[in-house]
Structure formats: C-alpha cells, structure tokens
Image (spheres, helix red, strand yellow):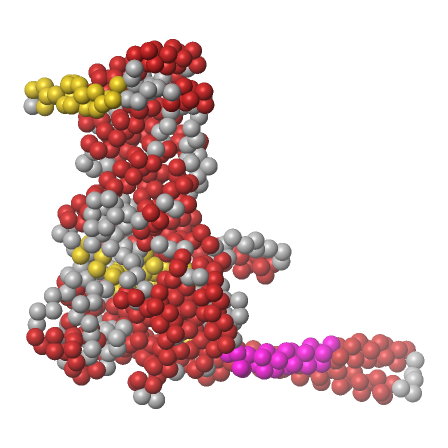
C-alpha cells in the first residue's frame, strides 16, 4: 500500500465532514482565536513552491492551545480530531498530553505540513513526503504501523494479550479459558467426591469384609491418581507462569523497546535526532510564523462586539444581585422631572502641589421634587443605612481610589447615597484605573461591600458598568501582549509519573532534573516514560549520567527545595504512565495572571465521555476497587475542571465505542472507525450553535450507515448549554474574573454559582 492510498482511505472516509464545515464556514470564516500567523512570503523560491503545491499564500492560520488525554490505541481518534481542526485553519501553539495523548502531542511538534516544510526551507524530496496537515503525516505513520509489534514481551504473553483485547479473538479465547476452567473444576470436584466415597468404603471394609471391597479400592486408587494429576497440572502451569515472569520484564509484561524504537525512527524521519533538534525546530518555526494578536476591543477595536454576546452567562451575572430597594421609593424617584446637565467646577485633587479643577456632569434636580424625595428617604431609610464615604476612605489602600472618593465627598455632600452617584463613582474608579492589581481589586471590593450593605445596586448589577469593566480587560490584555512585543512562545508538555521520587513530571520542562544540561537524548524517551502503562509495559528506567550527578542534585535543591543524594551507586529512576497522576493535564496552560481576556482557547480532547453528572453505584468489592483507582487517577484533573468551570466550554470527549484501548491488534476497519469517531466529535464541536437538528441527524445517520455507530456521545449533543462561541467565551472569562475578585458578600447574595 503506497503513501497516498494508506492515508487517503482515512481522509476520504471523513471528506463529507470537511465539506459540511466548509459550507458552514465559507472561506474559513470560522472565528476561533485572536492569535494568527502573519508569514512574510518574500522569498521567490518559497513562492514558487507554494504555487507548485497549490498552497494559498494569503491563508492565515488561527492558533489554539491543545491538551490530549491518554488512552492506548484510542489515540488514533486524536488524529481524527486534530485533522478536522487543521483542515479548518486551526493550528496549535502550546500542546500537552499524557500517554497516547503524549504521542499525538509530540508528533504534532515533530512533523511538518507542506506549508511548514516550505517555510522551513526543506528540500522538495522532503516536501513531497509531507501532507496538507500535520495530522495526515501522523496518520501515515499510524496506518502503516502494525501495532501488534508494540507488544514485545514473551511470545506466549503476546498471543494472550493480542487475543484478549481483540474483538474477533476475545470471545473464542474467553470461551476456551472458561471451558478449561470448568473441566478442571468439575474434574477436581468429581475426584474429591470419589475420594470421599472411597474413603468411606475403605472404612467399612476394614471392619467388615464385603464383596465390593475391590471396587472401593479401585475407585480410591483412581481418585488419588486423578487428584495427583490435577495438582501436577497446577504445578506445571505455575512453573510456566513463573517462567514467563522471569522471561518478562518482571514489573511489566512488555519491555516497550519496540515502541521506543518506533518513536525514534519517526522522529529521525523528520530530522529530530535529539531534544536540541526539537527545541530548535519549535523556536525557528515560531519565529517564522510571526504570530500576531488581532483581537478587537468591543465597541472600540476593529469589530464591534456582536449582540449575541448577551447570552445566558450575562443574564446570570446581571441577576447576581437583585434590586432590594423598596418599590415605592423607586417609583417616587422616577417621578422626578427630567434632569438637565449642570456643569460645575470642583476640586479634583492635588498634582505636583498645585490644585486643579475638573468639570463634571451632575444631575440637576428640581428643588421642590428634591425636597420631597429627601424627605421620603429620611422616613423610609435611616441615615445609618447610607454609605459613609468619609469612613469608607479610611479602609481604602490605593491613592487613586482615595482621591476619587474624596472628590465625591466634596462634590456630592450628604446625598451620595443616591444610586446615580454610586454608579458615577464606580464608573470613575474603573475609567481612572490604568491596571487592575491586587490593590485595585481590594478597594473595589470594599466599595461594593458598602454598597450592598446600603441596599444599592453594586457594580455587578449595572450592565453599563459591566461592559466598561470588560472593555478595560480587553485593553489590559492588549497592553500585556504589546509589552511582550506580540510574542507568543511555543510550549510542549509531556506528563509522566516518577515513582522513584513520587512526583508528576512535565517534559521537557523538567529535563534537567534527570539529564542536567545533556540534551543529546531522543525526545522518544519522554514518550516512553509517559506511555508506561502499569504491568502492560515495564516501568521506564533511566540511569542518571555520572557527569551530571552534581548538577542534578543542585537542580533538585534549588528548584524543588528537595535535597537529593544521587550517587554512582544510587542513580536509577523509574517512570510509569503519566495517567496515574494526570491523564488529562488541562491545567498546565491555565494562566489567569497575564491576561484578563484569553488570547486563544485551550482545546481539550478526552477519550471517554465524561459521565461525572451521572450517578455511579458502588455496591460490591470489585466496583469499590475500580472506583478507588479511578478517583486517584482523575482527582487532580477533575478538581481543576470543577474549580474552573469555564474551561468546559472547550473540552470535548470522543466516544470510542466498544473498541478496547488495549487492543494492539486492531483490524484496519477498527482503526478507520476510531479516526472517524474523532473527526465526527471535532465536526460537531466546531459547528456549535450553527448545527441544526436536521444536520445533526444527517451526520449521525451517516455514521450509523458507514460504521454502524449507535448512540454517539459528545458533550455538544448531551449538554445544550456547553456550545462554544469564541466571542461569548471571552466574555464569560471576563465575567469569571469579575466574580472571582468581587466581594464575598456579593457571592452570598448571589444565586449565580461558578
């Protein structure tokens, strides 16, 4: 099978999904990220190659971060998911993964698309071996690889494992095991019964001679022989298992060397011989991509914020605090005559020892109406229930905020309890703040607490002020990006579990903890460590280099505050599958400090449908053991997701059906089905709110027809409120920032739960 047919078989199977999305988003109009490349194609040779391979020079790709879950053979579905994303113009900046997810993550950083290869000045022979997308190149390696070769333990183990998890061989193997077990058990029970009968008969014959004494003795001898043979068989099988144990890796059935060598060969094929090569590739392409931040500030920037931004999250936030003022008071206030603008000069503060004046806009209230309102307010609202801004200013920290409050004391006098002045005050604070740090947020909390105590509408219940604050957040994000000179670094994270030191490890970030400044090893070492499925593969052992031991001990002490004593006699470290600690490391790219508004989404791909909302009954010892193991494996990832609920918007599961994740001998059709399932999940995710019921049913009917896929599950089909929209998502993240930083008193009053 040549290159084109092996890959095209997979891509043709999902061609209708690509067509559907292209019709839904013509000319790749999908708005998915604010980070795009801006490549300078100023080289004539490169332009000629772009034309030769029919690559659009005007295309600008959007960039997202991506996190991929571990799941053995199910990793083929990850390639299907990323293929659809890439076909829709989405590339990946930061990427992380565990186990099988680490394989796809690493290869996405190692391989090239045709466009990338041209940009990186590769020769035409190399470009010819590339595809339109990186995912297709990964698929090329996966489709040609006989995955059964990765099971490289003793031949008896190989046959057993490959049959046990294979759909076509599993049933006959299980039936055979059951049949042998039944024969053994029934034979043993029958022999024991005969033995007991014979023993009784022998007892009788010893006291009284009978004519059937010989028969009893014969049965006794037969029973002894059968039982002896049974025990002999048990001993032989035990010795066989012992032999297999000593001929395995002892702590795992498969040594995993074939897998490691396969990864090395794949990386070498792309010019990645060591960690240094990988680092240089990522740095060079990141530089050449010339990434830029093209976001707009709502109402100010290149595009106005769409009306669709007023979604359910905004409604929820607007209802955080209910207006608690008496309805009669509101009605009376609404009877006031129309206010004219009155321009007055007021003392605004002191700058460089000189007083300056500022013109502000205040409401002009008809004197008769004003007296009626104030009289009524005194009757229904005691003065103790008003905001004492003089006392409030004592609790403030930021000098700028103090100045604004002081200004309102001088200007507004004793009527500062009016909601108008409160809104203007909050408006002034937000508008006058160049950056929101811990001090600013604390002062805003203080003011909001006072407002809540006085039963006035706080910041969160005023849509105008919310929009103002969100706009500020956009400006802050733009400011941070500019401060970083519009640079977006490229990061790779492969998760493994160090069972010697009992910590979670993130490669290559923690490379120096084990190899010091020696970067000559292959990145395949990271993948082998992350892919060490307990008992299936032996734990991955590395031996720390003698020349680096002193440096490594210093690194542990300086960066982890741990005093290690690695010596030439004590320098072995063992790793197991990273999924034992973090199978879905979504938290590694969560940055809530640098940016108030996310510059790009973080896409999460899980390999089993997240059924956390469904009740799981634990009613026997087996379920108890599985539940305990599952809790330990997924606790940290799920804990993060629960605390940062907004991330669920971009996390999706691929329903992998009944294909076992340990089936390393899948049929060609099973591999194709996994790829299809991943592509289908990605298509539904990208379609989002634009997917009609008719279109959804058509896609699912096609899946049923082509691969007999029934009851396909993904979050978009189960939870109607999880649909992803990039502009709405950014606004929700801003709302989360407001909610996180505002007062506990506001949260107590709120029915809005994050």
Q: Is residue 369 above or below residue 633?
A: above
Q: In the rendered view of the protein, which quadrant contains the N terminus?
A: bottom left
User: Which residue is drawn at the image coordinates 47% and 62% (left, top)?
Assistant: 693
Question: Main SS type for the magenta part?
Answer: helix
User: Which residue is drawn at the image coordinates 28% and 62% (left, top)?
Assistant: 29
**Magenta segment includes 181:** yes
What is the magenta range?
166-189
Q: Quadrant of residue 3?
A: bottom left
Q: In the rendered view of the protein, which quadrant contains the C terminus?
A: top left
Q: Position of residue 338 (x, y in %)?
A: 30, 22
Q: Is residue 608 above or below residue 351?
A: below
Q: Is residue 577 above or below residue 126?
A: above
Q: Is residue 729 left or right of residue 346?
A: right
Q: Is residue 365 left or right of residue 236?
A: left
Query: Can residue 643 be seen in this snapshot?
Result: no
Work out whether residue 743 or residue 72 is closer to the camera in this orientation and state it: 743
Query: Can residue 626 be seen in this snapshot?
Result: yes
Q: Is residue 528 left or right of residue 181?
A: left
Q: Position of residue 699 (x, y in %)?
A: 45, 69
Q: Quadrant of residue 395?
A: top left
**Magenta segment includes 571:** no
User: Which residue is drawn at the image coordinates 68% and 81% (left, top)?
Assistant: 183
Work out whether residue 406 or residue 372 is closer to the camera in this orientation and state it: 372
Q: Position of residue 570 (x, y in %)?
A: 30, 62
Q: Position of residue 405 (x, y in %)?
A: 24, 22
Work out whether residue 34 or residue 650 is closer to the camera in this orientation and state it: 34
- Going by the picture, which residue comes out furthest to the front? 337
Work out whether residue 340 or residue 103 is closer to the camera in this orientation and state it: 340
């Amino acid at each position: 099978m040549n290159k084109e047919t092996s890959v095209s078989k997979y891509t043709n199977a999902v061609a209708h999904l690509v067509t559907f999305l292209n019709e839904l988003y013509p000319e790749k109009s999908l708005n998915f990220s604010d980070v795009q490349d801006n490549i300078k194609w100023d080289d004539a040779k490169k332009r000629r190659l772009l034309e030769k391979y029919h690559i659009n020079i005007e295309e600008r790709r959007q960039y997202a971060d991506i996190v991929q879950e571990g799941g053995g053979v199910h990793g083929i579905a990850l390639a299907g998911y990323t293929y659809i994303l890439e076909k829709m113009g989405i590339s990946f900046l930061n990427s992380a993964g565990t186990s099988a997810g680490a394989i796809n993550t690493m290869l996405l950083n190692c391989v090239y698309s045709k466009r990338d290869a041209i940009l990186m000045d590769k020769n035409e022979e190399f470009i010819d071996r590339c595809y339109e997308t990186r995912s297709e190149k990964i698929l090329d390696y996966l489709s040609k690889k006989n995955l059964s070769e990765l099971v490289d333990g003793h031949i008896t183990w190989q046959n057993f494992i490959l049959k046990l998890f294979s759909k076509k061989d599993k049933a006959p193997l299980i039936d055979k095991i059951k049949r042998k077990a039944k024969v053994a058990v029934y034979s043993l029970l029958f022999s024991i019964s005969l033995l007991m009968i014979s023993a009784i008969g022998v007892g009788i014959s010893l006291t009284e001679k009978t004519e059937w004494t010989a028969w009893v003795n014969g049965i006794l001898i037969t029973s002894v022989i059968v039982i002896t043979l049974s025990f002999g068989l048990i001993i032989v099988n035990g010795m066989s298992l012992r032999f297999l144990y000593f001929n395995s890796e002892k702590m795992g059935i498969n040594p995993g060397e074939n897998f490691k060598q396969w990864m090395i060969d794949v990386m070498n094929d792309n010019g990645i011989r060591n960690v240094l090569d990988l680092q240089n590739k990522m740095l060079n392409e990141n530089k050449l991509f010339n990434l830029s931040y093209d976001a707009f500030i709502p109402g100010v920037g290149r595009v106005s914020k769409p009306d669709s931004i007023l979604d359910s999250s905004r409604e929820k936030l607007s209802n955080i605090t209910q207006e608690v003022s008496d309805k009669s008071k509101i009605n009376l206030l609404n009877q006031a005559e129309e206010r004219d603008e009155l321009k007055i000069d007021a003392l605004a503060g002191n700058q460089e020892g000189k007083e300056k004046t500022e013109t502000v806009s205040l409401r002009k209230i008809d004197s008769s109406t004003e007296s009626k309102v104030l009289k009524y307010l005194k009757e229904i609202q005691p003065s103790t229930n008003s905001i004492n801004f003089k006392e409030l200013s004592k609790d403030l920290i930021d000098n700028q905020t103090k100045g604004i409050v002081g200004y309102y004391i001088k200007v507004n006098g004793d009527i500062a309890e009016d909601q108008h002045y409160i809104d203007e005050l909050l408006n002034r604070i937000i508008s006058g703040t160049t950056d929101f740090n811990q001090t600013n947020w604390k002062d805003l909390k203080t003011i909001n607490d006072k407002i809540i105590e006085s039963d006035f509408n706080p910041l969160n219940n005023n849509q105008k002020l919310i929009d103002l604050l969100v706009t500020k957040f956009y400006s802050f994000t733009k400011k941070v990006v500019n401060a970083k000179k519009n640079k977006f670094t490229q990061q790779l994270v492969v998760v493994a579990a160090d069972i010697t030191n009992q910590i979670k490890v993130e490669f290559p970030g923690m490379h120096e903890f084990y190899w010091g400044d020696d970067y000559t090893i292959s990145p395949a070492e990271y993948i082998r460590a992350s892919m060490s499925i307990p008992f299936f593969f032996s734990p991955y052992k590395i031996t720390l280099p003698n020349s680096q031991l002193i440096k490594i001990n210093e690194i542990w002490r300086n960066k982890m505050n741990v005093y290690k004593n690695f010596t030439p006699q004590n320098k072995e470290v063992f790793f197991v599958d990273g999924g034992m600690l973090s199978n879905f490391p979504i938290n590694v790219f969560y940055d809530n400090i640098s940016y108030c508004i996310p510059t790009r989404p973080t896409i999460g791909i899980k390999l089993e449908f997240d059924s956390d909302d469904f009740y799981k009954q634990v009613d026997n010892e087996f379920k108890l053991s599985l539940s305990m193991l599952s809790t330990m494996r997924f606790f940290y990832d799920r804990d993060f997701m629960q605390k940062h609920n907004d991330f669920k918007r971009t996390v999706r599961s691929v329903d992998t059906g009944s294909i076992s994740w340990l089936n390393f001998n899948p049929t060609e059709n099973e591999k194709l089905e996994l790829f299809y399932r991943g592509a289908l999940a990605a298509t539904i995710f990208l379609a989002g709110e634009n997917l009609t019921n008719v279109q959804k049913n058509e896609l699912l009917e096609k899946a049923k027809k082509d691969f007999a896929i029934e009851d396909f599950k993904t979050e978009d089909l189960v939870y109607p409120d999880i649909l992803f929209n990039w502009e709405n998502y950014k606004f929700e993240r801003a709302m989360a920032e407001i909610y996180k930083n505002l007062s506990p008193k506001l949260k107590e009053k709120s029915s809005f739960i994050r």
